[in-house]
Structure formats: structure tokens, C-alpha cells
Amino acid sequence: MTGHLRQRPAGIQTAALGIAAALLLSACATHAPRAPGTPRIVERPVEAPALSPQMAAAAETLTKMAALQDRLYKVASPLLIQNAELCKGQARNLLGFTAKNRWSYPGDYNEAAHVAFGMDERLQVTDVLTGSGAARAGLQTGDVLLSAGGKPLPAGEHALSQAGAIFGKIIASQPSLPMTVERHRSARQLTIPVTRACAFAIELGNSDNVNAYADGSRVLVTRGMINFTHDDDELAFVLATTMAHNMLGHPAAQRNSATIGSIIDNLKSITPDTSMLIGSGGIKAMPAEADAAADRLGIYLAARAGYDIKEAPAFWTRLAETYPSTVLNAYSANHPALPQRLAAVEKAIAEIKAKRSAKRPLLP
């Protein structure tokens, strides 16, 4: 990366999804997938000084994270929205977007977000949840947030938490949010309806171990797992099954919530401490019965979201063969009961096929 930074693809500014308590599922929570948009990225003039090696490296890190986060958003979107009725007490009203400013990034990444991507003190939309009220209202990646419900939105270091409080009060009392945004230096008025969705924050894990984690309220998929999946259907199997563990209360039942929560907190940072992944990381293996229940529910979640479920058994088999349970901090080490899991998956696929033929609802 040299002095001239070209226009990047939509969502380049995104570094991490989990700003839940602020915008996405606010009125309570945060997270998920995005609709394509045109980010407001400032091109650096040709005559601008070249970025320092340190700044270029930081910008490149954010760029790579953005691509992975975009894929997570895209795949998670229908899983969250189409399964709201199954999430029951874990569903919330959401606006369907996330936003950040330069202060959302620590240290050198703060300056990289500013210099390389044009992010400033104001909040900019970094992702829009596909199928959400925000997407239907026309909100786009790169829009600058000016006001909500007629109230000016804050800027600066604490803008995100302050804006979240404003959004939460409005969404708690009305079905839509009037907003003013800046796009191409012009103000635009939008009315964003709330969307009902599962209130699980979807996080990107910045590590190469092939795993996914659920702590009861969040789902984290590592960079290694995303890169292992061949297509969106396979990534959907991982997301749906991990969501299912949360829906079934497994982290709390196994008393793993705090341990896994600490791992998620660490891995979602830009530069995690990978020493936490030494050995098992303190995570107890999921019992076969619980794993089978989550795999069964996960197939229903994926099918309801429109994903092709027929290759799920082959995916889980390939994962277990490539990274067996002897590989610590890989998925199979935490979920070793492959025979029981495959039986549950195949049974769910057969049930869904029968229900579709009979034109019955896909309810587990």
C-alpha cells in the first residue's frame, strides 16, 4: 500500500461487528449482516505523502478484517431475521445497522481509519443488515449520522455509547426512527422501521484456529473457520449451530459462559492475545446430547433462512477429519461427538424435507 489509496469496496471501514449495545439491535442489542452500499471513503490525493510502513500495515489489517466481517454479516442476516420467532426471549427490535468513527479503533488503527479511510469524529454507517428496516429505508454504508428523532447525534470519542442511548429511548417507544444522514455532502431524511431479529451479536475472531464460540448472547467465528468454509451455506451451518447453542442455553448449563465470554472479548480485538488459546482455553467439551440438539436446531435455522442444507453432513465430516478432536482449540475438540451430531443433522434434514413436501411450517 503506497501513498495513493484507491476507492475500496463497500464496507471497507468495518473492523468488528460487535457494537451491539449501540445501534444494531439497540433497543437492546447488536449485530449481523449487511446490504451492499457505497462507503464514504476519502481518496487520498496522488500528491499526498506515502503512508508510513506502520500506517500501511494497520490500514491493510483493517481492510482484511472488513472483508471477513462483510461475509459474516451477509450470511448471518437471514439467520437472525428469519428465526426471530424461534429465539423467543432472545429476540429484540433492531434498527439493522452498525456505525463507527475513528475512535472505534485503538492506537495506530485510530489514525489508519482516519488517514486511510477518511473516518473522522462523526459516526459513519459501517454495515447495514440485509432485509432490515435500515436496508429497506435506503440507509447506506458510509452515511454519516447527523440526527435521530430530531436530536443531534454526538461525535468524538464517546459518540457510540452516547448515540446508543439516544436510539434506545426512541426505539423503545415507537416503531420507527426518523434520521438525518449526510451522503455525498448532502443531508437526507430517512425513516427507519424497527426489525424483529434474534439478538445475538455476531463477532469476527481475529485468530487462525478453526473454531466458533457461543457465550449465551454472542456468536464468534474465527478467521480460521471462515477461511475453512467453501461457501456461504457452510458458513451458515457454523453460524446457525452456534446460535442454536445460545438458544438452548448450553453455555450457561455447561458453566462455560464466563470462560467463553473472555475468549470472545479477546479474539474480537484487532490484536488478540493468542496465548489464551493454549491447551483447551479452559473450555469444557460439549456433551453429545447437547451437541446433537444444537446441530438439529441449527439445521432448522439454516433451512428457514433459505440455505441449502443437504451438504451439512459432508461439511461437518470434512471439518472433523481435517481438524480432529486431538487438535486443541479447534471446533472438534469442543464438539467431539461427531456420530451423534451427524445422526441429528441427517434426521433434521429428513424432517425438513417431509415438512416441505406436506407444506407444513419448518418448526423444530
Image (cartoon, rainbow, N blue to C red):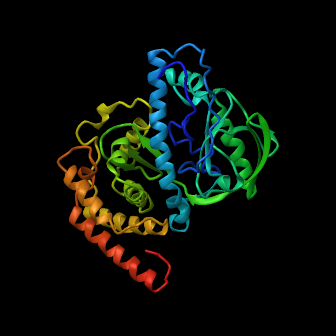
Q: Which quadrant of the structure image shows residue 137? A: bottom right
Q: Residue at x 37, y 47 (%)?
A: 226
**Residue found at the very far bottom of the displayed protein:** 358
Q: Is residue 283 above or below residue 247?
A: above
Look at the picture and state if 173 lies above or below 112: below
Residue at x 74%, y 55% (from the top left corner):
176
How many discs mark residues in the rendered view? 0
Q: Which residue is depicted at the point 63% across and 28% down?
A: 42
In the foreground, 247 or 360? 360
The location of residue 204, given as percent across then percent down, is 44, 42
Quarter of the image with the C terminus is bottom left
Picture coordinates of residue 329 (x, y %)?
Answer: 26, 43
Q: Residue furthest front?
A: 46
Relative height, residue 291 to residue 7 (above, below): below
Residue 125, quarter of the rendered image: top right
Q: Nearer the viewer, residue 12 or 77?
A: 12
| Residue 313 relative to residue 138: left or right | left
